[in-house]
Amino acid sequence: MRVLLLGNGGREHAIGWKLAQSRDLSLLLTAPGNPGLAEFGPVVTGFDINNPKAVTALAIDNKIDLAVIGPEAPLAAGVVDALIEAKIKTCGPARDGARLEASKAYAKDVMARAGVPTAEARTFTEVTAATEFLASKPGPYVVKADGLAAGKGVLVTEDLIAAQSWARICLEGHFGDAGSTVVVEDYLLGPEVSIFVLTDGKTALPLAPARDYKRLHDGNEGPNTGGMGTFSPLEGLPDGLVDWTVDSVVHPVLDVFRQDDITYRGFIYVGLILTEDGPKILEFNSRLGDPETQVVLPRLNDDLLGLLAAAAAGELHGKPLAWLDQAVVDVVIASEGYPDKPVIGRPVGGIEAAAAHPNALVFQAGTRRTATGIVSSGGRVLNIVGTGPDITSARTAAYAAVDEIHLEGMQFRKDIAL
Ligand code: GLY
């Protein structure tokens, strides 16, 4: 099978690594890819994956059988609609289904119609109404830009003035159209869990849960990031949480989609928070998580290519996925200045030495190959992954491999999976 994989992060490197293990793969073409993905097949660097016409032409020219979309932006840009129109099987929802992530207000509406437990929320398009509403509430405050803002559109704060300023910044155009509506939600407290479900619109197969560390610094301090580390499996989850997520969250959402004539084929990322009143949904994404994918796929004991092709064809089987009985821990290496102003273009050393460690994998993210070697090209640069029979040994393997990495000013958390 000839596969086109869109994206260039650690998530896509992990997807490509897993796809490359399939006997049925004859080509893995990646755009815009990264130096890690180049090990598995051709990479079209500098390619605009948010251009539906260009992606479709690339797929047709390369006789692609299956397109796999990693990040959310091409989904929201209608790339899947164009691929399907060109009769190319695609794992990833079309633009209507991708609104589950691309509009937080829409996601809230779907949750209400599906009877899914979530935080109470109000949406606003005017600054005065938003700031007055915030002033009428006790903190902490949760203010979200409605649309896609590359993970930067959410503020959680105790400070009313900061919350009101955030609403103003969004509504006055800081995020463009993505902030023309804001969602103000009740604050929920509890441990968070990410559960991904692969669906062909009818059948829903859950993947192993993972936990993401969203704050920059140890002890969950500092600014929110795209994710600084993750691990799987998770111990001590409420009994039946995964089945509940499938039966009481994902299937009701798919029922709403069917009522609205939306065919959803791909992943639904269910971001859960385990509150004292039971699990509630923090957010949906219309794709796999990054960095959670980097610990979930190394545990998957099934053929990812077969699963993605079946989901894209609307023929997903109902057999539960098989998992390796091993633990996986991922430590993200980020650039100096991340998340606000990452410094890029610095040499990244030690990737091969880290990957050569026993029980270690390296998934590249913000990297670029130059004539003199690999340099950083983004905020999150590398994922250093350790595996082992339990979390403690996986953690030890990951941090031993982290010690090999050289990147001036690099930031990483020392408490992942602790
Ligand atoms: N790890 C959070 C996300 O992928 O959105």
Image (tube, rainbow, N blue to C red):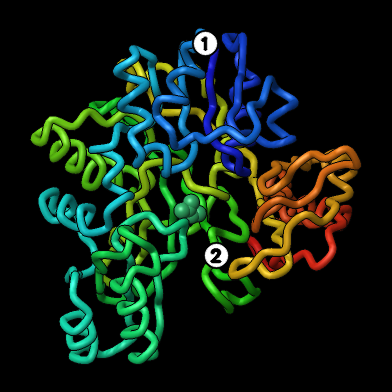
Q: Which label lies toward us, 1 or 2?
A: 1
Mark 1 to mark 2: distance in Å?
Answer: 37 Å
Q: In this view, does 103 lie to the left or right of 192?
A: left
Secondary structure beneath disc 2? Answer: loop
- What amino acid is labelled 2 in the image? Thr
Question: Is the residue indicated by label 1 positioned so its CB lies within 8 Å of ligand 1?
Answer: no
Q: Which residue is drawn at 43% across and 33% down?
A: 51
User: Which residue matches tag 1?
Assistant: 61
In-image side of 118 versus 29 (left or right): left
Residue 324 appears in the picture as rendered: no
State which tag comes first along the sequence, 1 or 2: 1
Quadrant where the C terminus sits is bottom right
The image shows residue 290 at horizontal and vertical percentages of 54, 48
What is the x, y in percent for residue 121? 19, 70
Residue underneath mark 2: 225
Of the numbered discs in the image, which one, if any, rests on residue 118? none
**Dividing the picture into quarters, in which one does residue 230 lie?**
bottom right
